[in-house]
Image (cartoon, coloured by chain):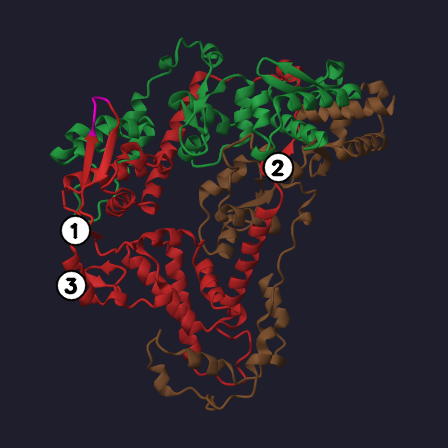
Chain colours: A red, B brown, C green
Amino acid sequence: MVKPQLQIVTKDSELEAGNELGQAEMPFAMVQGEPMAHVPRDLYIPPQALEVFLEAFEGPLDLLLYLIRRQNLDILDIPLADITRQYMNYIDLMQDMQLELAGEYLVMAATLAEIKSRMLLPRSAEAVTEESDPRADLVRRLQEYERFKAAAESIDRLPRLERDFWVANAHSELRRTREQHPPVSLDEMISAFREVVTRAEMFAHHHVQRERLSVRARMADILVAINSDTFVEFGKLFNANEGRMGVTVTFMAILELVREGLIDLVQTEIYGSLHVRSIQNRELRLVVDNITEEA
Amino acid sequence: MSQNHIRNVLEAALLAAGKPLSLAELAQLFDEDSRPEPAELRDGLQILGSDYAERSVEIKETSSGWRIQVRQLYAREVSRLWPERPQRYSRALLETIALIAYRQPITRAEIESVRGVAVNPNILKTLMERNWVRVVGHRDVPGHPELLGTTREFLDYFSLLSIEDLPPLAELKAMSDLNPQLSLPVSAEDDSPLVDVALLTAGLLGEADDVAYVSSAPVDLSVGPCDDDLAEAAH
Amino acid sequence: MSQNHIRNVLEAALLAAGKPLSLAELAQLFDEDSRPEPAELRDGLQILGSDYAERSVEIKETSSGWRIQVRQLYAREVSRLWPERPQRYSRALLETIALIAYRQPITRAEIESVRGVAVNPNILKTLMERNWVRVVGHRDVPGHPELLGTTREFLDYFSLLSIEDLPPLAELKAMSDLNPQLSLPVSAEDDSPLVDVALLTAGLLGEADDVAYVSSAPVDLSVGPCDDDLAEAAH
């Protein structure tokens, strides 16, 4: 098993590291050994949040809209070069982080590059009409998408059943006696189950790529959650809402921490509950793979 | 038949059914020889509604008929019955249903082209299982893709009488709306409207912003007759 | 708090629930700082009952609490709501009952995560009305979601003595035959250990109590590589 790059940095070495990198200019991510310092400041996203960030977008149009709206720009008058550069930066960042990127994002990158190159070409005055503005089609798509994005939000705000109001129901004995229940065969039910399991398996494959959870990130989370003064109940470290995979990642993270001698796992009685305590010295500061945890 | 009796049969049926009932279904409730006229049924529903004026429920007409529903006023209290928070719909699902609702009949490919991403099959499945969306036909193009539309259940869920009751879509603006800005007299900075050859050698994604503006700025676009074309193209 | 308000909240909840609610459940509906005493609740129910004197419904106390029910007087009319011939169950319903049977106890969210689509509340309602499914407890996670299980009636219907008599899933297991080599030992390029697909597919057929496994396994943990433990846990 490859040892995760988890290191304990003492105060001294932390100072060294600080001097070397410059406290303010600390790279926020290491990609293939290179600090990612070239990404503009306004693009800063903590690496762990990047996946969440990517999932926050419904696709390339949504990402473009975000870039435009963030600067209070009008869709009709996009500074294309600027927006294209920002868009490319995000794409590069996502690829560097090895996030699975939907092909649509790359298609949009190509489209932007094409529009931009067309805008660089000199055109005769007569030929320049709105139609020939290379941005026109993109603008139309952005506007159209934005309309439906807004429509989706307004549908979400409509009062709806089971959230804002409920259908009134009164008990009726008749319902029981009158309603005919359709017959179901055992075979029918088993084949339904077989199908759902098969489908779930396919779904699982699809999901894994989107929700890769890093064990190292989880190790950091755990170390943040516990301290050396008090014991934390083992079970409290797990969040059942994350499902089997999340629980497993947490479990693996705990195993790693035990192996690294970073935490203490204590069981006071047989079959009693387990408790976890950090055994790191309070003088020490943990640096997980160059991701600095803000104190 | 007394109005009170009609009112009570309507109330009994609506509360027992727990779903909207159409006037035709309501009429079926009564014995054949004393079946009220639609007007009488409407009167009965009206009376029921005014009886409920001070109550926790109201009578509401939705797409597939009439139903009695608990007023939104009591949502805070009633929702405590179900500690699990109500289901939230993902943006992808909401955008998909919005496109189907406003643009129906629509194919999956058309949804994808507006949203710019592939439609997750699970979303369509959820929408169909909820009976919000159904296949209403096939487009007469190669492959005969399915045309999707919304159902009455969808309208019922959001308490809408018809699809026209959906919130209006935002207006589209044509690019020429911005032309006054673009056609301003050329400023001192960029008084050379011609593109410098050197700029062409600049990296594709380099500092070419100005060029982009210059090349589209000097022409007076406001006379262009293309507003309509664009608006049309957008439809 | 006004009697009217109490009465309306009670009515709203009873009609929204469509099933009996106990005095304790009814008390929970109100804000903590203005929660009525049991006596006040009883008064509210009393008032509701007398309001219904001339109506199609009545309020009734049953073993599990209070409910609003349609008066027998309207049985003839109301019975016309329901068709004589049975309809068929949807695929979605069959998959839901199958999952509840094989994976019980299971929450609605868990069903949704396996099926990949939202569970239509009407499906659970139908299954509960048929008395095939019941709430067997609550999962000890935020929101305390209901755990669903099958009933004796369900077993009786299929002539099963116990849930173990359901046909084994041997073939299913063979199908998703999981690779015991979880990708814990990571490759050189990618030193961030990612969870393998096998883990997840294993989850499909496993039990949901990972934590229980985890907490009973810790003795060996310090020893070293945990592949085996994990593979076991995954089973």
Residue C192 placed where, x, y %?
Answer: 22, 48
Magenta span of residues: A267-271
Share a chain, discs 2 and 1? no
Q: Mark 3 points at which residue?
A: A16
Q: What is the spatial separation of the Cα atoms under label 2 and label 3, in whole angstroms? A: 59 Å
Chain identity of mark 1: A
* Along the viewing direction, whichever of C15 and C107 lies nearer the viewer: C15
Q: Mark 2 points at which residue?
A: B75
* Along the viewing direction, whichever of C204 and B125 lies nearer the viewer: C204
Check disc 2: other Cα within 10 Å, few if <14, some if 14-19, many if 20+: some
Query: Taking C114 as reference, is B224 above or below it?
Result: below
User: Which of the two marks, 2 or 1, is nearer to us in this view?
Assistant: 1
Q: At 49% from the left edge and 29% from the top edge, which residue is drawn?
A: C92
Query: Taking A106 as reference, is A204 above or below it?
Result: above
Instruction: Check disc 2 and give the amino acid type.
Output: Ala
Share a chain, discs 2 and 3? no
Instruction: Check disc 3 and give the amino acid type.
Output: Glu
